[in-house]
Amino acid sequence: MKKETPYKIGKKYLVRTVTMIYTGKLVDIYDRELVFTNCAWIPETSRWADTVEKGIFNEVEPYPKNANVIIGKGAILDVTEVSWALPSEQK
């Protein structure tokens, strides 16, 4: 029997980890990891409320478009589903 999860495959997320922030589209869920595509590493955000609500970032380092990025659940502080377009250009 599969356990319930708040994560939804195909949704876009902003993920805050103990050291960094990521954006991406969730493609798979494992017991200890989440797998995203169309990912970007965000070294610096704007004001947090603006970042979460509008997707405003001071710096963006995108991964290759179709690369899978695996994030360990143990490193995650919080995850927010977002509606804005995922950043794809380096900034």
Image: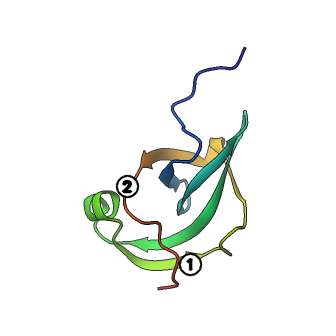
Q: Provide residue 29's location: percent of width, then percent of height.
A: 68, 39
Question: Farthest residue in the front direction?
Answer: 10
Q: Provide residue 61's location: percent of width, then percent of height.
A: 56, 78
Q: Provide residue 25's location: percent of width, then percent of height.
A: 57, 55
Q: Residues within 10 Å of mark 2 (few under 14, many from 20)?
A: few
| Left or right: 68 as drawn, with respect to 13 | right
Which residue sits at x=49%, y=52%? 13
| Left or right: 86 as drawn, with respect to 30 | left
Q: Secondary structure at mark 1?
A: strand
Label 2 with label 1: CB-CB less than 8 Å: no
Considering only vertical position in the picture, is 70 above or below 89?
above
| Left or right: 10 as drawn, with respect to 46 | right
**Amino acid marked by disc 2:** Ser
Q: Residues within 10 Å of mark 1 (few under 14, many from 20)?
A: some
Q: CA distance from mark 2 to mark 1?
A: 20 Å
Instruction: Report the label total.
Output: 2
Which residue sits at x=42%, y=66%? 85
Considering only vertical position in the picture, is 24 above or below 42?
above
Q: Provide residue 2's location: percent of width, then percent of height.
A: 69, 20
Q: Quadrant of residue 84?
A: bottom left
**Nearest to N terminus: mark 2 or mark 1:** 1
**Amino acid marked by disc 1:** Glu
**Closer to us: mark 2 or mark 1?**
2
Q: Nearer the viewer, residue 44 or 56?
A: 56
Q: Quadrant of residue 20?
A: bottom right
Which residue sits at x=72%, y=67%? 67
Tell me the number on the disc at residue 83: 2
Mark 1, residue position:
61
Which residue sits at x=72%, y=14%? 1
